[in-house]
Image: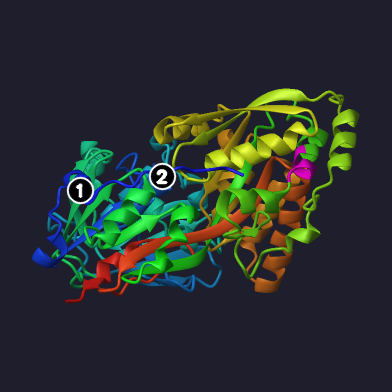
């Protein structure tokens, strides 16, 4: 068991760190005072992969469509959309009221330029692989965008709902300023960003979504989530994003606070690097899968706050983990597989993790280290600052990695970037075979829900058997708020977008 020691800061020290008076909520009720423990790592919505970046950017930028709390597609910049009968043409009508935060209208030219930027390999866009079916984009008028697809592409709408597919100004793309400043069409403007300290957001009066519930949001970055809870107790913080279940589970004990807790699609995973020996050997990877007790990892690192999962975390499509390869720990089988692969005496490897994202990373690594030692695997744990970790992760520069990866409402959108031959995060996955690629392509084109479920069920079973990664568990998204905060709607995607409509009750 991992023992964590917390040091709670005094109210006076917290007030100095937060830069607000103790009575700030009462003095300026129109500003939402918020805190989180991990800051954004960058401002380019097309490139960012860290949850902390996406949570900030989704308040500033908008995609064509969004996913609601029921995982249904709803309007954003686009008010309507329609597929042609053959599924190869997708037409959007844009909201005529949509404006960027400098007051200029969002037009079809901005949409076209944004997707051309995403598709340009030089951009390094995180979601590029989701849009490779786009063969051309027409803009018959300022409010109409027509995507011509090389094949029917059922998941493309879900892919377009992500902030990684945000619409940015064509003029900013031309100027090369994307990422150096934030200019979107979302509910809030970014007025100030002091990295690892504070963000100051103000309401976008031109937002087509209507008036926001608050005039602005001031976000303080406090790496210790126990300090965030202490600040909430003294009412210096109105709303907080929490990642650490050890802290989140304390919130219901506070009479003045409310905990929002919902299961999420994101998954905790041990990523192996099958391009590095001895993980190149299937039986070694399978031995690691058999040696890991996923429930113990969950119970120790996250207090049991979650459930063991296979690759698919979408409830309607997920396979019962007991049906997947070696999901019940079998150390003897693991030792036998190691011997058959020629590694009866084990081997040494390094596992990397990010400090603070997720907060459970170090604990997960320690439990896995102990479990793998039983089959002779000597695991060295290397914890890194988030930006250093992300850089190594994107390059595939690791033996193994503890990761918390984002889920999506569609399995193709969720995994094609890793497990297709054209996936733009193949360096991260370092594994592909004909079966995985074929299953992904079949699922992408299939329109019948029952047939899609069957295709992705086989995909999930094959992926678990090949064991390039060891899926561990899904957990919860946690937000805490003062009880006078109204209107926040938590979702399985973990988005904070509904902060656009929260109000502070007097």
Earlier-in-chain disc, 1 versus 2: 2
On the image, which quarter does residue 356 sit in? top left
Instruction: Single out the mark in the foreground, 1 or 2.
Output: 2
Q: Residue at x 88, y 41 (%)?
A: 333
Is 434 rendered above or below residue 211? Answer: above
Q: Is residue 144 above or below residue 114?
A: below
Q: Is residue 231 left or right of residue 279?
A: left
- Alpha-carbon span between mark 1 and mark 2: 19 Å
What residue is drawn where x is 26% and y is 67%? Answer: 500
Q: Is residue 301 magenta?
A: no
- Binning the other alpha carbons within 10 Å of mark 1 as few (below 14), some (14 to 19) or many (20 upward) gives many
The secondary element bearing badge 2 is classed as loop
Residue on which the image places disc 2: 6
Q: Is residue 505 visible?
A: yes
Disc 1, SS: helix
Q: Residues within 10 Å of mark 2 (few under 14, many from 20)?
A: few
Label count reads 2
User: Which segment did they paint magenta?
Assistant: 288-292
Judge from the rendering whether residue 240 lies leftward or rightward of residue 49; answer left or right.
left
Asked if the residue at tag 2 contacts the one at tag 1, i.e. Cβ–Cβ closer than 8 Å, the answer is no
Of 21 and 86, which appears nearest the observer? Answer: 21
Q: Which residue is mark 1?
A: 18
Residue 423 appears anywhere in the view: no
Q: Nearer the viewer, residue 12 or 54?
A: 12
- Give residue 135's position: percent from left, percent from top: 47, 51
> Would you say 177 lies left or right of 261 here?
left
Residue occupying image coordinates x 33% and y 58%: 240
Q: Position of residue 503 (x, y in %)?
A: 22, 73
Our reading of the magenta stretch's main secondary structure is helix
Query: Is 291 contained in the magenta span?
Result: yes
Quadrant containing the C terminus in the rendered view: bottom left
């Amino acid at each position: 068991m991992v023992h964590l020691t917390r040091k709670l800061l005094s109210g006076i020290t917290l007030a100095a760190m937060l830069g607000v008076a103790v009575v700030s909520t009462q003095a300026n009720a129109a500003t939402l005072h918020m805190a989180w423990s991990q800051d954004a790592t960058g401002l380019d919505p097309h490139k960012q992969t860290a949850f902390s970046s996406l949570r900030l950017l989704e308040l500033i930028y908008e995609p064509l469509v969004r996913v609601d709390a029921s995982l249904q597609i709803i309007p954003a910049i686009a008010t309507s959309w329609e597929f042609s009968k053959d599924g190869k043409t997708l037409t959007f009508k844009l909201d005529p009221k949509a404006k960027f935060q400098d007051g200029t209208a969002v037009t079809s030219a901005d949409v076209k330029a944004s997707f051309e930027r995403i598709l340009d390999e030089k951009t390094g866009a995180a979601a590029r692989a989701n849009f490779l079916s786009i063969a051309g984009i027409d803009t018959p008028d300022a409010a109409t965008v027509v995507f011509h697809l090389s094949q029917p592409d059922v998941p493309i709408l879900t892919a377009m709902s992500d902030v990684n597919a945000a619409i940015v100004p064509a003029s900013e793309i031309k100027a090369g300023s994307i990422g150096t400043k934030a200019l979107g069409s979302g509910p809030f403007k970014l007025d100030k960003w002091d990295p690892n300290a504070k963000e100051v957001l103000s309401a976008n009066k031109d937002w087509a979504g209507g008036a926001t519930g608050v005039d602005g949001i001031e976000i303080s970055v406090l790496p210790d989530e126990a300090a965030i809870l202490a600040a909430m107790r003294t009412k210096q913080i109105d709303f907080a994003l929490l990642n650490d279940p050890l802290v989140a589970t304390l919130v219901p004990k506070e009479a003045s606070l409310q905990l929002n807790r919902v299961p999420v699609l994101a998954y905790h995973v041990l990523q192996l690097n099958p391009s590095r020996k001895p993980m190149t050997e299937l039986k070694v990877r399978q031995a690691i899968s058999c040696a890991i007790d996923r429930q113990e990892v969950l119970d120790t690192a996250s207090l049991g706050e979650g459930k063991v999962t296979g690759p698919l975390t979408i409830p309607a499509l997920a396979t019962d983990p007991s049906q997947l390869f070696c999901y019940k720990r079998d150390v003897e089988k693991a030792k036998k597989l190691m011997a058959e692969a020629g590694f009866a005496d084990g081997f040494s490897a390094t596992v990397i993790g990010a400090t603070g994202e997720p907060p459970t990373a170090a604990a997960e690594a320690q439990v896995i280290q102990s479990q793998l030692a039983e089959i002779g695997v000597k695991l060295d744990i290397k914890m890194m600052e988030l930006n250093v970790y992300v850089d190594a992760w994107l390059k595939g520069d690791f033996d193994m990695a503890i990761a918390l990866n984002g889920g999506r409402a569609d399995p193709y959108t969720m995994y094609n970037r890793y497990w297709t031959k054209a996936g733009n995060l193949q360096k991260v996955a370092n594994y592909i075979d004909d079966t995985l690629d074929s299953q992904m392509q079949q699922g992408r084109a299939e329109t019948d829900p029952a047939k899609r479920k069957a295709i992705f069920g086989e995909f999930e079973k094959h992926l678990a058997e090949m064991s390039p990664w060891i899926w561990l568990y899904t957990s919860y998204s946690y937000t805490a708020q003062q009880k006078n905060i109204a209107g926040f709607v938590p979702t399985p995607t973990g988005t904070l977008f509904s902060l656009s409509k929260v109000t502070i009750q007097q």
